[in-house]
Structure formats: structure tokens, C-alpha cells
Amino acid sequence: MALHWKILIGLVLGIVVGIGINLFWTESTWEAIGVQEPATFLSATGPERVATETGDGVNAAAGFVAKSARFIRNANDFVGDLFMRLLRFIAVPIVLFSLIAGVASLNDTAKLGRIGGKTIGIYLTTTALAITVGLLLANIIGPGRGFREDVRTTLVESQAASAGEKIARAETRPTPWEVMLDIVPENPFAALAETQMLQVVCASLLVGVGLTLLPREKASPVVVLCESMTEVIIKIVHIVLALAPYAVFALIVPVLSDLGMEVLLNLLKYCVTVVLGLAIMIFIVYPTILRIFTRVPYRHFFWAISPAQLLAFSSSSSGATLPVTMECCEERLGAHDEVGSFVLPLGATINMDGTALYQGVAAVFIAQMYGLGLDVSDQLTIVLTATLASIGTAAVPGVGIIMLVIVLQSVNIPLEGIAVILGVDRILDMCRTMCNVTGDCMVCAVVADTENALEDPEKVRARYEEAQKRLDEYTREQEEFEKAAG
Ligand code: ASP
């Protein structure tokens, strides 16, 4: 079975189990087992955990089932975290080695400059386009118009602490000058150790350029080493990908089991607006750009990048998905290494179309909820600040909502509105991360094709399927051999 189907099955099963646990954990279950603080019950360990279980054994059976549900949730949380660690483990080395090898083999610094300019130009354009789609939809649908005041007050009160913490985090942000300065690492080893992706990209580019300036015989041992290390990391990515269907299941269960269904229903119109906007980007805007600028059919594109999309959805992190995104674009889409290893890490860090779209919708939603009008100049300010905010958003879960603070401040929308949308942030984060990763892959295809660095889609697919067939045959022979021997 093809990998993306396996991942999809893992995802669907995870959704079913997660929702099952969620439905089970109702107020009456908590009462029956005498748990006063459900959140602490779910996450507590040791003596704290005993203290949360103050039940008098009224309903031992319910207690047993609740504890089993907790075990399933926490075990999945653990497996998901383990998988994410594995992904993060490969993200830095794959960028470092493949970018150095790519730039050195390109041997053309002028071409490198052109690729860089093109990439950043398309990234900024698609991001501005995404916010425009978000703003248009939010103005037409009006998710915040007529929002019930009592619901708003309850949500603001219940989420006040968590929203306050997010607002405080946004307040300590660096200035744009500091952000730009920070791209150049003072210490490349610290950049590697601290996973500063833009700094790693900058350091790898410099080393790659340095290698192209050296005489061939001096440069080639390093280039060969980097090429071999890239192959090693790609092998690890294959192992990780084989685990992906199970990991996706594990990642999704805790998210859905903890999701407040009531909050989701209250904010349904808002969620639908965001998801509709993301769908327009993924299914209309990107295919149109691909059609205009490349010869890649959208079906092929979708087939090639679907494992990365599904993983982005499950993990809510374009940074952690990066190794898989690179594998999909280079092996399945056919983009050459020097393009993929430059465009994709850059995209994972600065290109966040989904996040920008979401920030646009959220700003209009909160303004509508408070009965504030946003005129054309306010909306243009949102386009500008959301573009910058999405660039500054780190590629990890839940940062989009922190950067939303900047967008709200720019047009004087009350920051406490963030508390209202906090409850559904994780689920929207999953959807916007999927859009972010799709956007990165689309730009990779455009840059590669316009630079003559994209293999013929038919050929890539035929090669991939041939390799898959050979692998299947090998596995079958192996099984037959073991049967005969056993
Ligand atoms: N989770 C998103 C990403 O990694 C960023 C965000 O919108 O919070 O792409």
C-alpha cells in the first residue's frame, strides 16, 4: 500500500479514537470517579496524581475505564513526542549537508543569487495573496458579526491566564533590525546546536560558496563527505517515514481527546472561514500558479507531497516536517537538491501562507465581535503586518497566535479577543501548517522548473514506482526464503 494511504489510515483511526476518548470524558464521568480537576488528572504524575484522584470508589468501573482512557491518551502523547524528537534530530543535519553539497555542486554563485531573489519574491507574493483571501472571506462571511456576548465573556474569562501568557510572550519580541541581523550566525556551531534554521541556512550557503572558490582537488573531499552524509540522513528519513503512519495516529489522539467540543461549536463559523480560506489556497491558488509557471500536473504534485502534508497536519510544525518535505520534493517531485535544500528550509522558516491567512481572518473576526469597523487602510495595514508577522513566526506549534498580537496591535483591536479563539487554536494550527508546507513545496516546484532543475514528472513517478515494485519483490522473496528455511 502506498505510504500516503497508510498515513491517512493512521490519521483517520487517530481521529476516531481521539474523539471517542473526548466523548467519554464528560462531566458525569469525572463526577463518577471523583476527579475534581480533569486537566491535572490527565497530566499529573507521582503524588500529585494520587491527590487528583479523590474519589470514594463510588463507581470503580467508571474509574477503571477513565484511567484506561488516560493511559491511551498519555501513551500516544509519549509516542508522538518520541517521533517528533526523531524528526527534529534530522532537520539540522539534512539542511546543513545537503545545502553545502548542493551549492558546491552548483558551482555558480550568480545562479544562487537568482534562485534566492526568486524564492523570496514568490514567498512574499503568495503570503500577501493568502492574507487577501482571508480578509475577503472574513468580510463576506462575517464570522464575528452578532457573536453572543455571554459566550464571549465566558471564553475570555476561562482563557484569560493562557491568553495573557501569549500576549506577554509577543511583547518581548526583537525589532525587525535584530531579526535581520540574527540571520548571520556569530557562531555557526551554536546555530547548529540551537536549531536556528535561518542561521544554519546562512552558514551552509557561506561554506558552499567557499567550496566553489577553492581548487577542485581541495574542495572535493568535503563535498564528497557532505554528499555521503546527505545520503545517510535520507536513509534515516526513510526509516522515519516507515514509522509515520503509527506516529500520525499517536500525534492526533491527544489533540482530539483534549479538544473542547463546546468551544468548537461556538466558534464554528470562524473555523469554517479559516478552513475555507486554506482550502482555496491549496486547491485553487497553488494549482493555478503551478499551471502557469510549471509543467507539473497538480495530481502529480499532490501525490508527491501528500506524506509531508499529512505529517504537517498531524504535527502542527513545518520545522519538524522539513526532512519529510525535502524528501518528498527531491525524491518524489524531482526537484534538484540545490534548489530543494535552499528553498524548503527557507520556506519552513519564513513562508507561512496559512498562518498569515489565519491571522487576517482572526483579526477581522475579533474586530467584528467587538463591533469595530475596519476601513480599507486598516485592512492594508493588516496585510502588511500579517506578512511580517508570519515571516517572524517560528515553525513550531502555536506560534501563529502569539504573532497575532502584533497584527491586532497595529489596528487597535482589543488583545483580550485572543482568549476567545484560543480553544480552537490547535485544530486550526494543524490546518494552517498543512497549507504552509504545501506553499513551500509549490514554490520549490516553480523555482526548480524555471531554473531547469526539475525532472520530468512522468519519469520521476515511473522511477519511484519501479523502486517500490523492486522493494515489494525483494520482501516477497525474503518471506518465501524464510518460509522454505523454516
Ligand atoms: N505551526 C505553524 C507552522 O509550524 C506555525 C503557526 O502558525 O503557529 O508552520
Image (spheres, rainbow, N blue to C red):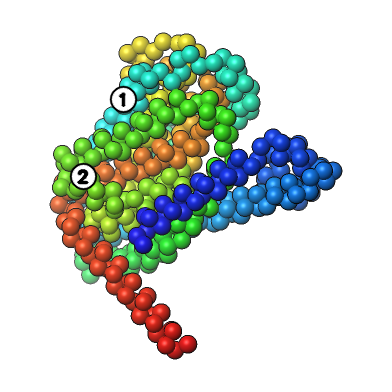
Task: Judge the density around disc 1: few (<14), some (14-19), many (≥20) Cα neighbours within 10 Å.
Answer: many
First of labels 2, 1 by sequence position: 1
Q: Looking at the image, which residue is at 39% across and 33% down?
A: 275
Q: Secondary structure at mark 2?
A: helix
Q: Secondary structure at mark 1?
A: helix
User: For the N terminus, which image quadrant?
Assistant: bottom left
Q: Looking at the image, which residue is at 55% across and 46% down?
A: 18
Residue type, numbered disc 2: Val
Question: Image height check: is 137 above or below 76?
Answer: above
Ligand 1 appears in which quadrant? top left
Question: Image height check: is 324 above or below 439?
Answer: below
Q: Nearer the viewer, residue 39 or 150?
A: 150
Q: Nearer the viewer, residue 8 or 100?
A: 8
Q: Nearer the viewer, residue 140 or 179?
A: 140
Q: Looking at the image, which residue is at 41% across and 52% down?
A: 8
Q: Is mark 1 within 8 Å of ligand 1?
A: no
Residue 409 location (% of width, % of height): 46, 20
Residue furthest toward the right? 56
Question: Image height check: is 373 above or below 402?
Answer: above
Residue 52 location (% of width, % of height): 77, 42
Q: Is residue 231 visible?
A: yes
* The quarter of the displayed image where residue 121 is located: top left
Question: Image height check: is 336 above or below 283?
Answer: below
Task: Judge the density around disc 2: few (<14), some (14-19), many (≥20) Cα neighbours within 10 Å.
Answer: many
